[in-house]
């Protein structure tokens, strides 16, 4: 078996393992927590980079197999470090979530869709990046708030939003 075939088989196996990791990666998530270079994503990327570089260099150059192996190992290490520090590390610390808590909606402005009676419940809708959120609401001081009025969410108590009619601040320059 030629060295080109070995590089190609390793590349195919690494690709198959990567695809399996995409589907079943949650099982192995805790492995690389303490030592970042034992992270399965980093290890599979390293093997993929080395085998791909080795195959391309074996096919396209007249270098000896030892030079190709050391060159592909060097390229694999450099690409793996770049992948880790510029892609994986920023992605792991990024917080992207469509989830919200009721408390995180305090301070936002909503619109009354079911009138809020004094000493009673109504309904408001708050527009967020994730879409519209309907919530039960009462007047902060038990005041009545009519349909279509803009309201400011003051606080949240047990899933009920305490709101006041919203009066935007207008700065009049004289």
Image (cartoon, rainbow, N blue to C red):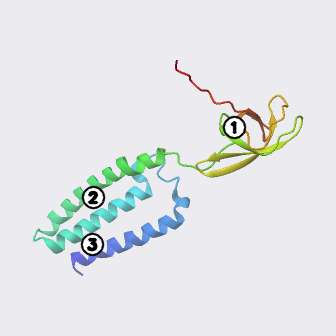
- Mark 2, Cα crowd under 10 Å, few <14 / some 14-19 / many 20+, is many
Q: Position of residue 57 (x, y in %)?
A: 18, 68
Apparent side of residue 63 relative to residue 124 in the rendered image (left or right):
left
Q: Earlier in the sequence, mark 2 or mark 3?
A: 3
Q: Is residue 52 above or below residue 152?
A: below
Q: Residue at x 63, y 49 (%)?
A: 99
Q: CA distance from mark 2 to mark 3?
A: 13 Å
The residue closer to the viewer here, 42 or 145, is 145
Q: Earlier in the sequence, mark 1 or mark 2?
A: 2
The residue closer to the viewer here, 39 or 106, is 106
Secondary structure at badge 2 equals helix
User: Which residue does the numbered mark 2 point to in the structure image?
Assistant: 76
Q: CA distance from mark 1 to mark 2?
A: 47 Å
Q: CA distance from mark 1 to mark 3?
A: 55 Å
Secondary structure at badge 3 equals helix
Q: Position of residue 63 (x, y in %)?
A: 11, 68
Apparent side of residue 46 relative to residue 148 in the rendered image (left or right):
left
Task: Name the quadrant containing residue 58.
Answer: bottom left
Residue farthest toward the front in the current orientation of the protein:
174
Secondary structure at badge 1 equals helix
Residue farthest toward the top in the current orientation of the protein:
174
- The answer to whether marks 2 and 3 mark residues whose Cβ atoms lie closer than 8 Å is no
Q: Position of residue 131 (x, y in %)?
A: 63, 52
* Marks 1, 3: nearer the viewer: 1
Residue farthest toward the bottom in the current orientation of the protein:
1
User: Which residue does the numbered mark 3 point to in the structure image?
Assistant: 7
Q: Is residue 19 above or below residue 41?
A: below
User: Which residue does the numbered mark 1 point to in the structure image?
Assistant: 103
């Amino acid at each position: 078996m030629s060295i080109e075939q070995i590089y190609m088989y390793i590349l195919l196996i690494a690709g198959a393992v990567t695809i399996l990791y995409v589907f079943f990666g949650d099982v192995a998530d805790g492995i690389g927590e303490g030592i970042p270079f034992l992270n399965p994503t980093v290890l599979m990327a390293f093997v993929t980079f080395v085998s791909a570089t080795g195959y391309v260099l074996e096919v396209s150059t007249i270098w000896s197999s030892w030079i190709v192996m050391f060159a592909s190992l060097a390229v694999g290490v450099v690409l793996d470090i770049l992948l880790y520090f510029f892609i994986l590390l920023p992605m792991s610390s990024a917080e992207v979530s469509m989830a919200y808590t009721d408390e995180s909606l305090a301070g936002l402005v909503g619109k009354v869709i079911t009138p809020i009676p004094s000493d009673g419940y109504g309904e408001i809708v708050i527009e967020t990046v994730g879409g519209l959120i309907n919530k039960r609401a009462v007047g902060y001081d038990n005041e009545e708030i009519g349909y279509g009025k803009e309201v400011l969410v003051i606080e949240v108590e047990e899933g009920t939003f305490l709101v006041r009619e919203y009066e935007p601040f207008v700065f009049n320059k004289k």
